[in-house]
Amino acid sequence: MPEYFETFDANGVPQGLVSRSQVHARGLWHKSAHVFLFTPNEELYLQRRAHDKDLYANLWDYSVGEHLTPGETYHAAAQRGLQEELGVSGVALQALGEARPSSFIVAEQHIADQEFQQAYRGTYAGSVHPDPAEVAEVRTIGLAELARWIEHAPEQFTPLFVRDIVDLGFLTLSSANHDR
């Protein structure tokens, strides 16, 4: 059964429901929530996306990235994503600014990913239980070590994650790797 997203024009005006594959193929605006989940020791949870994901397969990414279901709020999607992807619940999430537009072209896959994105930060002190259909691997990492890793091998990360972790003030990278 196809997954449907609410779509919007560039000003955020609702345009109707469209299947996920068509949303990405046609470059339609839709919504997503991203979570930067930290341990109490300020290490960031990273997930490596499953090998069969339609976008950014096998790349390291946000702790959680979740498309909104029709009628869902950003916060509810972030909480749902924590539960579905990492098996985590009860995390207090802090919005990082307002939702913002994001456009990224994946030319080799003929995809235009255009989203209104809301980022969140949370802290969690328990074990995670990743869903293998969504997540290949989870690890925690300090921000200084993460910066070195991204500088050395930016191709191992989703470009949106690299952009956002810099734009939201978590890391400083050279412009060559930030703008890749």
Image: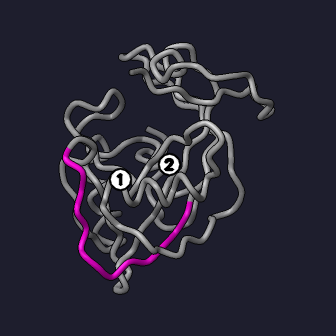
The x and y percentages for residue 111 are 46, 19
Q: Secondary structure at mark 1?
A: helix
User: Three-letter amino acid code at disc 1?
Assistant: Glu
Which residue is tagged 2?
Answer: 163
User: The N terminus lies in which quarter of the figure?
Assistant: top left
User: Three-letter amino acid code at disc 2?
Assistant: Arg
Which residue is tagged 1?
Answer: 84
* Residue farthest toward the front in the current orientation of the protein: 1
Q: Secondary structure at mark 2?
A: helix
The x and y percentages for residue 27 are 58, 19
User: Is 128 included in the stretch rendered in magenta?
Assistant: yes
Residue at 33% from the left image edge and 34% from the top image edge: 56
User: Is 1 included in the stretch rendered in magenta?
Assistant: no
Residue at 25% from the left image edge and 67% from the top image edge: 128
Q: Examine the residues drawn in magenta and state their main secondary structure.
A: loop
The x and y percentages for residue 110 are 43, 13
Q: How far separated are the C-alphas under marks 2 and 1? A: 24 Å
- Comparing 72 with 95, the one in front is 72
